[in-house]
Image: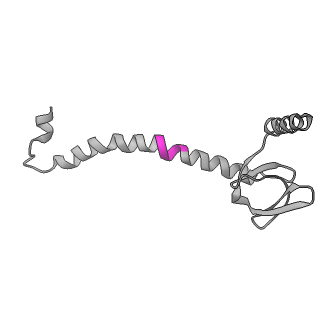
């Protein structure tokens, strides 16, 4: 088998088929392991950003947790503390904070206050 692949092809027409036989599986693996999951993740994030509404609790790419107060032209205003509001771009929001996550944070704060 290896002598067949290494043998010189006098016609030269088999080079393309050898190339395709070797690289088609690699391209297929690359597509299913890298490109497709990235497209699905991007679609998921775009859907989440499109469905944001006032009152949602979000986390930004910088790690800031806040509650959405208002929207303007691609900018989202977040309240991160009492009377502290920051403007971030909509694309800087990386995810929604679920009630379970914020519940864990509240439990940790309560434990710290007890000490």
Looking at this view, name the residue that lies furthest to the front.
115
Looking at the picture, how far across and down is residue 104, in whole percent?
81, 35
Most extreme residue toward the bottom is 73
> Percent x, y for residue 51?
77, 51
User: Which residue is depicted at the point 89% across and 36% down?
Assistant: 110
- The way the protein has been coloured in the rendering is one colour
Q: Quadrant of residue 80?
A: bottom right
Residue name at image x 76 percent, y 62 percent: 88
Q: Nearer the viewer, residue 9 or 6?
A: 6
Q: Residue furthest left?
A: 10
**Magenta stretch: residue 28 in it?**
no
Q: Is residue 36 magenta?
A: yes
Screen quadrant of the C terminus: top right
| Percent of width and height locating residue 66 | 82, 52
The quadrant of the rendering that contains the N terminus is top left
- In the rendered image, which quarter is residue 100 located in? top right
Main secondary-structure element of the magenta-colored stretch: helix
For image coordinates 28% across by 45% down, the residue present is: 20
Q: Is residue 24 left or right of residue 73?
A: left
Which segment did they paint magenta?
33-37
- 22 on left or right of 85: left
How far across and down, in percent of the image, does residue 96 sit? 76, 46
68 w.r.t. 20: above or below: below
Numbered circles on residues, count: 0
């Amino acid at each position: 088998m290896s002598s067949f692949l290494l043998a010189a092809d006098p016609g030269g027409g088999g080079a393309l088929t050898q190339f395709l036989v070797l690289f088609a599986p690699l391209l297929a693996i690359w597509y299913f392991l890298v490109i497709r999951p990235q497209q699905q993740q991007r679609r998921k994030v775009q859907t989440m950003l499109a469905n944001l509404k006032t009152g949602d609790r979000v986390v930004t790419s910088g790690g800031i947790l806040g509650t959405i107060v208002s929207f303007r032209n691609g900018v989202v205003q977040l309240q991160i503390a009492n009377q502290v509001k920051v403007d971030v771009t909509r694309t800087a929001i990386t995810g929604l904070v679920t009630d379970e996550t914020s519940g864990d944070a509240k439990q940790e704060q309560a434990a710290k206050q007890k000490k």
